[in-house]
Image (cartoon, rainbow, N blue to C red):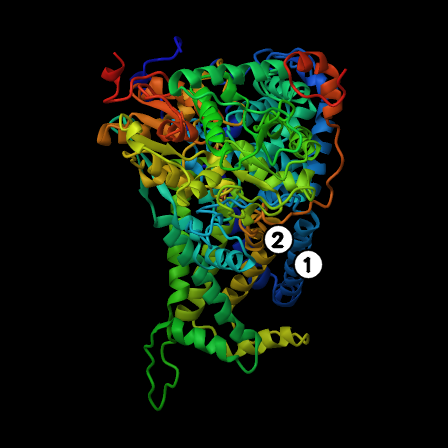
Amino acid sequence: MSDLPKPDEFLDTIDHKPPPKGWMDTPTQIKPGMYCYASNPKSVEYVGLPNARQWNPLDDDWGLPENWRQILHEGFKERLDRFRSIKVFMDICVRCGACADKCHFFIGTGDPKNMPVLRAELLRSVYRNDFTTVGKIFGRLNGSRKMTLDVLKEWWYYLFQCTECRRCSVFCPYGIDTAEITIMGRELLNLLGLNIDWIATPVANCYRTGNHLGIQPHAYKDMLDFFVDDIEEVTGVRVEPSFNKKGADVLFITPSGDVFADPGTYTAMGYLILFHYLKDMGLDITWSTYASEGGNFGFFTSHEMMKRLNSKMYAEAKRLGVKWILGGECGHMWRVIHQYMDTMNGPADFMETPVSPITGTRFENAASTKMVHIAEFLADLIKHGKLNLDPSRNDHLKVTYHDSCNPARGMGLLDEPRYVIQNVCNHFYEMPPNTIREQTFCCGSGSGLNAGEDMELRMAGGLPRANAVKYVHEKHGVNMLSCVCAIDRAVLPALMEYWVPEVDVTGLCELVANALIIPGEKKKTTDLRGEDLPGMEDEDV
Amino acid sequence: MNENYMFSLMAVILLFLLAVLGVDGFGLYSFFGIFVPYLSFAVFVGFFLYRVIGWARSPVPFRIPTTCGQGKSLPWIKHAPIDNPSTTGGVVVRMLLEIVLFRSLFRNVKLQFRERGAKIFYDWELWLWIAALAFHWAFFAVVVRHLRFFTEPTPGFVKFFEYMDSFFRVEILTDVVQIGLPAMFISGFVLLVAVVYLLLRRMFIPKVKYISLSSDYFPLFLIIAIAVSGILMRYVSKVDIVSVKAFTLSLVKLSPALPEGVGTIFYVHLFLVCVLLVYFPFSKLMHMGGVFMSPTRNLANNTRMKRHVNPWNYPVDVHTYEEYEEEFRDKMIEAGLPVEKGE
Ligand code: SF4
Ligand code: SF4
């Protein structure tokens, strides 16, 4: 983060007043810090996507195929015929501007093309020219323009400055979802090989090894074994996860990010501890090295790529013969599972409606997809008093909760995590109402934008979220930001370090595991992070 | 000066002059009184349907409601049945609130940077909602009121609407003058005020101005012109309503007979309405049809309970477990992971 200006200076550069010149006459300048590097051709090729080549967004020549305009035009047409959403959204925006200041990227950059309505207009202007008679006749007066290389670059730049968070859609009187438009736009860009590497390479990794990080099966097991040792050190209890176990009742799938880097790793330890705790109560659960990714960067590439990566979940469930699937904490993973998986890769009729082996609760809300969110599973356990919890072990934390965009606006998972947190922590404070639940602000790094090279963009996009955290930090002394998303856990620490350095980031299951009284545990003196528990430290000395 | 609204303003003025010239200058009464109305009505209906059918022909492959409240999950967790509907009933209510009360616009907030951005506020901002609601409802009332001209006898609900709409009646009923001032209808004035607000907003709020196209100003100017000509006709030049109704009824009965002595302003009003009808299906005004078809609002959030089928779902290349094990088998065996094809 060394090239970033100081936070105050950063704020001073944000100006929400649009420039005097119209947006069609303002050429796009691709600025370092605001974009992610171009896709590595090897990754593009590995999954068989077209036009793999070395290219650089800063170059004049992007090495496009000769007939690129035709490819785009035909691709656009095909998608208009396939998706009513796109067709309707292209036609009915009235440019009322209600969505304009709802996007975290507009709030944090002041760049008018980051107003959702203008982001959509970047595509709509070409749509009007290519697919409507009135647009052809009236041209610019009707807001139409031809596709040119500059327009294409503008698309690329701004479609990768949208995290597909759907906040704009909440405020639009017609529900126009700019995320849907971005999804489609990125799909079109991918026809020309114009992905970013932070998406393309995880996709290729996931296709090959089963997870975005490219962790091979033996290494995956090693990493979890590592956690097993760490857990033993803290709790004195040795947990024994099973892998690829045929005939298990439940398959567990979570984002690979959590086995890889702090603080996600503590959430992963949380899962391990929880499953160990529930083992004697009847939970027979297995991890998979093949379906070792919950997230789906294919979703940020194309609908087809999403389906190809997602297919592993049901395939593995079928191979292992499990009854249902439990899903870990992740944001976009859950949008894919909740709104797409069953449609794409179902029906999952080889499984049963999920039933918690501990409480007997039937998860009717997952009757068809057969996959339950860990927050739902936990809330049910706690409600039935099945977890022996000591929330005072989290007393050193003043916790707030960040709703991830996808579970909030593509699912409606709002109160389950809150219920869990309030049962494992004594100090919980909500951020202001316009910044949580369905109005939650994105971490600013979702949808594959969590690279290192676009840090300025990330800090800008994360500003509204950080500012709300700062508010509760100053008002209530909040020092821990909890979330149910692996990308959040990967990116919020950097965001906090920049805007609110006194606040740390945690997953839900880490908080649960810290509060959980495990049978046979030794006297705990630290939490999973190895930090001293208040009131317990001295006894250790 | 902004080319976008100047162009639209000029266009509306030209259309106005066209009508005046056509009727007063060239006496093209049947053209403006009969031909244009029939043509524009046909274009409106035909292309409106064409557009809606066009949308309907594209399938809804995925169930993608934007959820704006707690989803239905565990029975004891309080669910938001309207903002995150799990049933068709919930969707119907959600859509009704959206269409009748502009629910989503009601959420509108305004971004405020205070202390140079150190504090960011999102203040509730209702003006757009109020103006939009006033505009649409007034427009609706005006349309319903005008049904009087196309029906005989006037249906009860139209009379009811008129009754509700008449703000105050300054009727002078003497033996000589039976009509006096016509009742004032609020709807026309509300419509005018709201539409002027919407126009000023577009012209003066920098962000909204920045995103506005000529095609955003044009319908506003057009509707202002229609409303003004209508109000003038009713309250100032007092067009003979009886002959207007005879004329409009003759149009409905497909035996058009031009009215006597109704003056140019009537033709201008009629012509501008016709322009609006023709413009409608080719423009953003189609949001009237589209709002019903938005997949982020009109679907229940029940995908995990009930499978949603994508009509064009096609098979894709996947990396199978067998291929995966083939590549990593040795490493898996070494790590003690179970494999399908062991040694
Ligand atoms: S809120 Fe909806 S209709 Fe209004 S400008 Fe945004 S996308 Fe268009
Ligand atoms: S989906 Fe989110 S990031 Fe994208 S335009 Fe809408 S508010 Fe902005």
Q: Report crowding for label 1: few under 14, some 14 to 19, many 20 or more residues within 10 A (C-alpha).
A: few
Q: Amino acid at mark 2?
A: Pro
The part of the image, by quadrant, that contains residue B193 is bottom left
| Residue extending farthest bottom | B175
Amino acid type of the residue tagged 1 in the rendering: Gly
In this orientation, which residue lies closer to the viewer: A154 or A353?
A353
Mark 1: C-beta under 8 Å from nearest atom of ligand 1 = no
- Residue A355 shows up from this direction: yes
Figure quadrant of residue A539: top left
Q: CA distance from mark 2 to mark 1?
A: 9 Å
Vertical arrangement, residue B235 with respect to residue A441, above or below: below
- Residue at image point 42% right, 51% down: B76
Position in image of residue A409 (x %, y %): 48, 41
Residue sitting at 38 percent across and 41 percent down?
A419
Q: Which residue is mark 1?
A: B46
| C-beta proximity under 8 Å, tags 2 and 1 | yes
Quarter of the image where the N terminus of chain B is located: top left
Q: How many marks?
A: 2
Q: Position of residue A305 (x, y in %)?
A: 67, 28
Pointers 2 and 1 within a single chain: yes
Find residue B281 and name its label. Answer: 2
Q: Residue furthest front?
A: A520
Q: Earlier in the sequence, mark 2 or mark 1?
A: 1
Q: Secondary structure at mark 2?
A: helix
x 72%, y 15%: residue: B329
In the rendered image, is residue A97 in sight?
no
Neighbour class for label 2 at 10 Å: few (<14), some, many (≥20)? many
- Give the x, y percent position of residue A304: 69, 32
Mark 1 chain = B
Q: Is residue B257 left or right of residue A461?
A: right
Q: Is mark 2 within 8 Å of ligand 1?
A: no
**Element type at marker 1?**
helix
